[in-house]
Image (cartoon, helix red, strand yellow):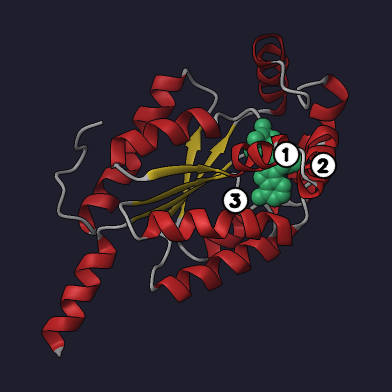
Amino acid sequence: MQNEENDHRHETDRVVRLLLLAPPGAGKGTQGERLAAWSGAEHIAAGDLLRAEAQTGSALGREIAACQASGDLVPDQIVLDVLIPAITAAAARAGFILDGFPRNLSQALAAAELATRLGLTLQAAVYLHAPESVLIQRLLNRATQDGRADDRADVIRHRLRVYAETTGALVPYYAQRGILVTVNADQPPDAVTADIQARLSGLLAASDDRPPGSPS
Ligand code: ADP
């Protein structure tokens, strides 16, 4: 029995369970992709999954598109319906890097409940921070390249306000749980990646039998 329990723990410990917490423009998407390639886990980007759903043109898609265009949060139940199947599937494989979820306290509670249901705990919440002036400049630059509908000066300001008023509360939430890893995102992307990997390699190695810093 003891051995079976140990075997089970060993199995679930191999699953990567990370989330990226950051204001718009801090580089969650870029770092999420790199972290996924590095760790072997899946990058689950809430905004991308919701944008894909929006593009279907369904009634649900239209509701999502309206929220995204204005920079408001999509209602929690819709977010959970879109994300939980993806997270559950990734948890049964090599694990997940959550990018943009949870984004408020009730989503964080839903995420904790899901983790309990899956028999998993989060290993770390990586908090990327940068001064607001840097974030605004990056988003305005991205607007000229990607043409995302919400990268307009007025919507950018609103998204940053939503972050400050709602998502920012998750920084103390994860700090209190002892899993917050804070990284300076006001550096070139490679330096941010190196900092994240340096902070996480011990942690992932401790719960995993892959060699630390193992391949991308
Ligand atoms: P950014 O972080 O630059 O705002 P994202 O692609 O992560 O970019 O999010 C874009 C938009 O998608 C948000 O402004 C919001 O409308 C919606 N969204 C993404 N994730 C969530 C979430 N967890 N809860 C509610 N809405 C979300």
Q: Residue furthest bottom?
A: 1
The amino acid type found where label 1 is placed reads: Ala
Position of 175 compared to 134: left or right? left
How many numbered marks does the figure carry?
3
Q: Which residue is mark 3?
A: 101
Provide the secondary structure element on which disc 3 rests.
loop
Could you say which quadrant of the image residue 139 lies in?
top right
Q: Which residue is mark 1?
A: 54
Where's residue 194, x and y in %? Answer: 34, 29
Residue at the image position 24 percent from the left and 59 percent from the top: 207
Q: Which mark is residue 142?
A: none
Kindly tell me whether residue 123 is visible in this rendering: no
Of marks 3 and 1, the one in the foreground: 1
Contact, CB < 8 Å: mark 2 with mark 1? Answer: yes
Label whose residue precedes the other's in the sequence (3 or 1) = 1
Could you say which quadrant of the image residue 120 lies in?
bottom left
Label whose residue precedes the other's in the sequence (2 or 1) = 1
| Nearer to me, 128 or 96 | 96
In what quadrant of the picture does the C terminus appear?
Answer: top left
The verdict on label 3 being within 8 Å of ligand 1 is yes
| Nearer to me, 160 or 91 | 91
- Within 10 angstroms of label 3, few (less than 14), some, or many (20 or more) residues? many
Compared to residue 155, the image places residue 143 above or below, namely: above
Where's residue 175, x and y in %? Answer: 53, 58
Residue at the image position 60 percent from the left and 44 percent from the top: 46
Residue at the image position 76 percent from the left and 43 percent from the top: 61
The amino acid type found where label 3 is placed reads: Phe
Residue at the image position 48 percent from the left and 56 percent from the top: 87
Provide the secondary structure element on which disc 2 rests.
helix
Could you say which quadrant of the image residue 208 lies in?
bottom left
